[in-house]
Structures are given as C-alpha cells and as structure tokens.
Amino acid sequence: MEFFRLAVLLFLICTPKYCASSGVDPTLQLELVHVLTRHGDRNMLDPKWSYPDDPYRNESYWPEGYAQLSKLGKQQHYALGQWFRTRYSKFLSEAYSLYDIYVESSDVDRTIMSAQANLAGLYPPNGTIDPTSVWNEALPWQPIPVHTIPKDFDNKLQLSAPCPRASRLISDYNNGPETIAILSENAEMFAHFANNTGRPIRNLADVHFLYDPLLIKSIHNYSLPAWSEGYFPGGQLFNLTSMSFRVWTWNDELKRLKGGPMIKEVVQHFQEKVQGVNYSVGQGETVRLTDTTDEFEVDERPEADDHTDGARKLQSSIKTLDKRMKFFMSSGHDTTISSVLNSLGVWNGLPPPYASAVMFELKRKPGRIQGDKEAYFVEIYYRNETGPSDPNLLTIPGCAASCRLDKFVELTRSAIPLNWEWDCIDASFTA
Ligand SMILES: *[C@@H]1O[C@H](CO)[C@@H](O)[C@H](O)[C@H]1NC(C)=O
Ligand SMILES: *[C@@H]1O[C@H](CO)[C@@H](O)[C@H](O)[C@H]1NC(C)=O
Ligand SMILES: *[C@@H]1O[C@H](CO)[C@@H](O)[C@H](O)[C@H]1NC(C)=O
Ligand SMILES: *[C@@H]1O[C@H](CO)[C@@H](O)[C@H](O)[C@H]1NC(C)=O
Ligand SMILES: *[C@@H]1O[C@H](CO)[C@@H](O)[C@H](O)[C@H]1NC(C)=O
Ligand SMILES: *[C@@H]1O[C@H](CO)[C@@H](O)[C@H](O)[C@H]1NC(C)=O
Ligand SMILES: *[C@@H]1O[C@H](CO)[C@@H](O)[C@H](O)[C@H]1NC(C)=O
C-alpha cells in the first residue's frame, strides 16, 4: 500500500519529459519562490521604430496607446496569475497578506499593468477565506501593491540604469567581427529592407526593431507590408532577431552587468531564507555578497563612503521585508528574461514570449532543520509559452536539476557583480 502510494505520487510529480534522469528530487518541499515574468501582449512601440510608409503609424489603430498592454495582454497575465494560483495552491495562502508576497515591476506602464492583471488572477477576493478581501460586492478584485524602480536606477528589470562599461561592450559587439560577418552574410536581405524602410541595418538591434513592428501587426491581425513577404514570419529574420537577445550578455563581463543584479537578488533572498533573517530588496548593487567561503554569511553593507553619490542614493532605497515572505514577483521584459537565463547558461536562444515566466524555487529536504546547509536546493523552471503549458525544467551547467544551494551559490558567483556601480565605470573611456 505504501509503495503504491509512493508510486502514484512519483507518477504525478514527474511528467514524462523529465523524470528518472532529470535530477529532480521529488521529495523536496517548497520554501520560497522568486518569479520573473515578461509583460503580456502590447501595442506597437513608438512609431519611430516602424517604417515611414507604415499605415499603422497612427495611434487610432492602438486603442490603449503605443507600447501599452493590450486587452489580450491583460488576459494573458490574468491567466498566468491563475496558473500561479494553481501551481502554488499548497504553498501560497489564498488570502493576500503583506507577509507573503512582494511584487516589483520596471517603471513601464505595460509591466506594471501586467503585474496588476496577474495579481487579479492570483488573489481573487473570497469572503469565506478572508472577509476583508471583499470590499465591493460588485467588483471581484482587491488592490495589491506593485512597487517600481525608477528607470535611471533600474539595473535589475528594465536594465536601463546607465552603465558606461556595458554600453561600451555592447558597442564593441556591434562593431566587432561577429556583427561584420552577419552583415556580410545577409547583405542582400538587409539592402532589401533598407530600400523599403529607409533605415539601414547596422547591427542585430536594428534587425530586432525591424522584426518587432511586423510581429506586432501579425498578432493584431493588421496587414503586413508587401516587402516583408518571404521574410516574415520565421526564417533568417527570426533567427537573427533571436540572436539579438544575446548581445546584452554576449561575454562574461556583460553577463555580470546585465543579468547579474537579478541573479544576485535571487541568491540573496535564498540565503536570507536559510538564515531566517528579514529580506532586503532594493536596487541591490550596494549590498555586497560576502566573498568568504561561507556562503551563508549575512551580506554586509559597505560604508556609504565606499561609493559614488549614485550608489549612496540607491542604498537609501533598500527596504527590509519580513522573513515570513514566501513569494517575490518581478515584472520585466523579454530582455530581462533572456539576459538572466543567458547569464545562468540556460537560455534556449529564443525570444521570451509574452507572459512567459521563470520560476526560481528554493526547496528543503523534509525533516532537515532550517539553517542546515545540506538541506536546501534550487530548481529553475521556465514557462516559455504564452498560454498554459508545462514549464521546462532548466538545469544549471555543472549541477543537478535540484541543485544544492551551496553549489548553486558557487556556480552563480561569477555571474554576480560585487559592486555594480564600480564595475560600470568604463576605464577604457578615460584612457
Ligand atoms: C489617424 O487616423 C485617424 C482615424 O482614422 C484619422 O482621422 C487621422 O487623420 C489619422 N492621423 C494621421 C496623422 O494620419
Ligand atoms: C472561497 O473559498 C471557499 C473555501 O476554500 C471555497 O469553497 C469557495 O468556492 C470559494 N469561493 C469562490 C468564489 O472562489
Ligand atoms: C533598391 O532600390 C534601388 C532603386 O530603387 C534598386 O535599383 C535596387 O535594386 C534595390 N535593391 C534591393 C536590394 O532591393
Ligand atoms: C486576431 O485574430 C484571431 C483570429 O480571429 C483572434 O483570435 C485574435 O484574438 C486576434 N488578435 C487580436 C490581438 O485581436
Ligand atoms: C542563424 O543565423 C546565423 C548567423 O547568420 C547562422 O550561423 C545560423 O546558421 C542561422 N541558423 C538558422 C537556423 O538559420
Ligand atoms: C524584521 O521585519 C519586521 C517587520 O516585518 C520588523 O518588525 C523587525 O524589526 C525586523 N527585524 C530586523 C532584525 O530587522
Ligand atoms: C520553449 O522552449 C522549448 C525548449 O527550449 C522550445 O522547444 C520551444 O520552442 C519554446 N517555445 C517558445 C514559444 O519559444
């Protein structure tokens, strides 16, 4: 009987795609979740990214406004919130509590609205469970806070904080041998685009901005320009657009500067959970990871004097959150997801779809006490479809899919900046 129950349990936990050989330990119990999502379907970006004779360069075609979350996008994130509710039903209380969840978004309308739509799906009010959640009988919704980071300080979600060193390295790539080879291999196609759009293709970012207005039109059922026939969808244009997502993290230094701050925060929250201390959230770069061999040392804040004025301003924005917290949600962009995953060595090379989500899960061996270093494991899942789907299990190179936390910390160390502000100084500029 016991064996039968165990067998049924294993059958339920392991989908056929990855069981026996996946390296997942199905007995582990969830302790903490950190999710990173992309916003839902959006309208055309600023028309300056489109082509001059684009008939849809007129906001009347985009009722919510340029770059805004569309009605479809709202539905997608609401559905993702319901999916989180199902996935974490045993873990996350059905009643909203400030001690359970903390949500952060880039300061962009569509990511903030995506987080809000998501939370509507994750926390529908229910008077039986929580009488305070029903405050207007006619409205099955309750307000839940979504925090943002000012663009100029955001090195974690929009990756828009100025970082001269990163800009230099990206420009090195855009002027480097790989770009030159791509330009020459695709010279004919690019000349065709330039002829028809009036805009030259000089690097992969230009390819991306050519692809994007076509993709948005096709999703919104608007007609495509004749010159895109045979080039869109799919094919080499899609291939090169996918490659453009790698540019922000094309070498190890950029992985630290672009993907690193988010990874650092996840690792830090996992360590704080193990230690049973309050969490800290903020821009993060002034919170140094300890450089000792003891991965579970509380990270020390450097003295304010160690830093530039910018860093000091950020330090004052770091908040303390209750140690009971279970769920961190970060609402970002396709470039956030691709940069974080590529920095971890687990990106699939494809553009992250709308309302896709990476789930970092900290788990504990049952029966092991809190603080026991050998008891904690990290699993990473990627729900890389817009609609309901089984998430893909991602395995960090050098580790099992259930990766022991101390090993995870060791393997991600090189992708985490010690001092982002300092590392962003472009030394070659002054030389
Ligand atoms: C945008 O579309 C509206 C409605 O079709 C039209 O009245 C307006 O003239 C257009 N604006 C431009 C700049 O083309
Ligand atoms: C509210 O929660 C109760 C208890 O879990 C459940 O039976 C009921 O279906 C829920 N109501 C709604 C509207 O979801
Ligand atoms: C670009 O346009 C010019 C002039 O209209 C034409 O001669 C040329 O063949 C075009 N090139 C491509 C690649 O479409
Ligand atoms: C485009 O058309 C399809 C098929 O009719 C529909 O399902 C979809 O919702 C439409 N897209 C938008 C953004 O309205
Ligand atoms: C994608 O483009 C790169 C660079 O041009 C090329 O090396 C690669 O073979 C292409 N892959 C596919 C599937 O077309
Ligand atoms: C931890 O956070 C709680 C608020 O939830 C606060 O009351 C407490 O003082 C904090 N403890 C420390 C050591 O910062
Ligand atoms: C999701 O990831 C899998 C595995 O890398 C891939 O085969 C699939 O095409 C991806 N789906 C999308 C929509 O990118």
Image (cartoon, helix red, strand yellow):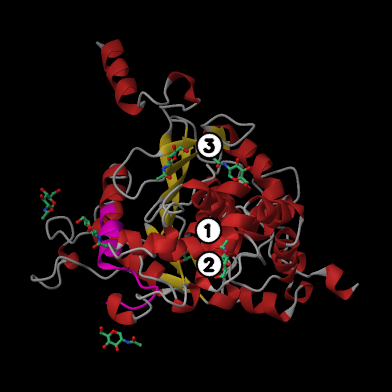
Whether tag 1 and tag 3 are in contact, CB under 8 A, the answer is no
Question: Of callouts 1 and 3, which one flags the residue occurring earlier in the amino acid sequence?
Answer: 1
Quarter holding the C terminus is: bottom right
Quarter holding the N terminus is: top left
Q: Which mark is residue 336?
A: 1
Q: Amino acid at mark 1?
A: Thr
In this rendering, the label closer to the viewer, 2 or 3:
2
Instruction: Name the element at disc 3.
Output: strand
Whether tag 1 and tag 2 are in contact, CB under 8 A, the answer is yes
- Within 10 Å of the Cα at label 2, are there few (<14), some (14-19), or many (20+) other Cα atoms? many
In this rendering, the label closer to the viewer, 1 or 3:
1
Where is residue 75? Give x, y as percent: 25, 60
Q: Which mark is residue 45?
A: none
Query: Residue drawn at (29%, 55%), measured in percent from left and top?
Result: 81
Instruction: Name the element at disc 1.
Output: helix
Where is residue 144? Give x, y as percent: 31, 68
Question: Of callouts 2 and 3, which one flags the residue occurring earlier in the amino acid sequence?
Answer: 2
Q: Which residue is mark 3?
A: 376
- Within 10 Å of the Cα at label 3, are there few (<14), some (14-19), or many (20+) other Cα atoms? many
Q: Which residue is mark 2?
A: 158
Of residue 377 and residue 160, the one placed in the foreground of this image is 160
Q: Is mark 3 within 8 Å of ligand 6?
A: no
Query: Residue drawn at (75%, 51%), measured in percent from left and top?
Result: 291
Where is residue 368? Give x, y as percent: 49, 31
Residue 391 sits in quarter: top left
Residue 102 within the magenta-colored segment of the rendering: no
Q: CA distance from mark 1 to mark 3?
A: 26 Å
Q: Amino acid at mark 2?
A: Gln
Residue 216 sits in quarter: bottom left
Of residue 159 and residue 207, the one placed in the foreground of this image is 207
Q: So how many labels did they put on this image?
A: 3
- First to last magenta residue range: 63-79
